[in-house]
Image (cartoon, rainbow, N blue to C red):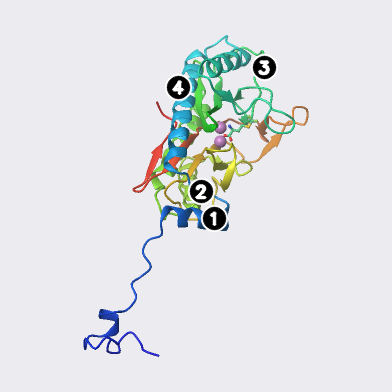
């Protein structure tokens, strides 16, 4: 058996490793990577055509969310905001991803999560009040492609504690986004978020996760916002969300037994969340859910 430092078999008098030694396998093609990610992780790397579709849906979702946030004022009910979400969705030739989703079927085109609600709040007839904080989470389906995003809205004068969670949750989202590029492990999202939350004395919700999104609402991988050991490297063509939920007090939440959706902090203290849909690019990451 010829070894790397032996003379090459071709008679050049050079070492084999400097001559006809077989080259390292070239970087695999998109097709090979896509097959590997599908088989090993059940993750779908998107084609340029799918990316165009997802980009358009995300742009629409961001535009609609903008209008919803501007409309959310003291005295307006969350049901009225939901009605506007449905109208704008229809006018854009899109479909809501959340109406009828899950079990029990979610009844609205947005989640409206106020104050101590962590996520999945259901719109109702309570008018927004001075001092409320609210997350609006909106997901569109445009030409079969999904765009998922959420933001916080502040009504009038809010407490220091509410101001803190709103700001910290947003800092967490952007700190996590900053880490994303090909080759970085998915668990780094959790590292980044825990670091920021801890710095401000806030806690990170672990009962709800971020997710692949694009050709379906909730795809692989599940991405935890807390410390974890998910050793999957980000790869070009992955589309997914980051959506940290940050609590002022304890990290634990409880789901409402009656509606099967509304998740509230166990201690009743404030919670906040911000969400973007992202695309891993050759160099880094693109935020898809902005106008
Ligand atoms: N948009 C949420 C997410 O970020 C999911 C809402 S599901 C619903 O994944 F049924 F509650 F609307
Ligand atoms: Co999401
Ligand atoms: Co969402």
Residue 239 locus on image (x, y percent): 48, 42
The residue depicted at 58 percent of the width and 30 percent of the height is 270
For label 2, the residue is 190
Residue 63: image tag: 4
Q: Residue furthest left?
A: 13
Q: Residue furthest front?
A: 10
Nearer-the-camera pick, 33 or 208: 33
**Labels 2 and 4 touching (C-beta < 8 A):** no
For label 1, the residue is 230
Label 4 sits on a secondary structure element that is helix
Image quarter (top left, top right, bottom left or bottom right) of the N terminus: bottom left
**Labels 1 and 3 touching (C-beta < 8 A):** no
Nearer-the-camera pick, 192 or 230: 230
The residue depicted at 44 percent of the width and 51 percent of the height is 235
Q: Is residue 86 above or below residue 210?
A: above
How far apart marks 2 and 1 lie (CA) works out to 9 Å
Residue 110 locus on image (x, y percent): 59, 23
How far apart marks 3 and 2 lie (CA) works out to 33 Å
For label 3, the residue is 124
The residue depicted at 36 percent of the width and 48 percent of the height is 282
Label 3 sits on a secondary structure element that is loop
Determine the quadrant in which ligand 3 lies.
top right
In the displayed structure image, the side of residue 275 where residue 205 appears, left or right: right
Q: Is residue 118 above or below residue 44?
A: above
How many residues crowd mark 1 within 10 Å: few (<14), some (14–19), many (20+)?
Answer: some
| N-term mark: 2 or 1 | 2
Q: Residue furthest right?
A: 258
| N-term mark: 3 or 4 | 4
């Amino acid at each position: 058996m010829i070894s790397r430092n032996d003379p090459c078999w071709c008679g050049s008098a050079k070492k084999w490793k400097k001559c006809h030694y077989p080259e390292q396998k070239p970087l695999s093609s998109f097709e090979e990577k896509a097959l590997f990610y599908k088989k090993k992780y059940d993750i779908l790397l998107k084609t340029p055509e799918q990316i165009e579709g997802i980009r358009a849906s995300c742009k629409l979702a961001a535009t609609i969310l903008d209008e919803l946030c501007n409309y959310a004022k003291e005295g307006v009910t969350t049901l009225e905001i939901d009605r506007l979400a449905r109208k704008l969705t229809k006018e854009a030739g899109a479909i809501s991803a959340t109406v009828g989703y899950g079990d029990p079927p979610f009844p609205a085109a947005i989640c409206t999560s106020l104050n101590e609600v962590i996520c999945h709040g259901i719109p109702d007839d309570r008018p927004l009040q001075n001092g409320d904080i609210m997350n609006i989470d909106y997901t569109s389906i445009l030409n079969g492609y999904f765009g998922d995003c959420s933001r916080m809205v502040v009504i009038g004068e809010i407490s220091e504690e509410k101001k803190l969670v709103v700001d910290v949750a947003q800092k967490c989202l952007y700190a996590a986004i900053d880490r994303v590029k090909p080759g970085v492990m998915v668990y780094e999202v959790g590292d980044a978020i825990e670091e920021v939350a801890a710095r401000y004395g806030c806690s990170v919700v672990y009962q709800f996760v971020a997710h692949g999104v694009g050709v379906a609402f909730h795809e692989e991988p599940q991405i935890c916002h807390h410390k974890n050991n998910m050793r999957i490297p980000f790869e070009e063509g992955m589309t997914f969300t980051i959506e940290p939920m940050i609590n002022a007090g304890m990290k634990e939440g409880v789901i409402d037994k009656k509606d099967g959706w509304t998740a509230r902090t166990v201690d009743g203290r404030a919670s906040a969340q911000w969400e973007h849909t992202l695309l891993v690019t050759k160099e880094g990451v693109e935020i898809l859910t902005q106008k």
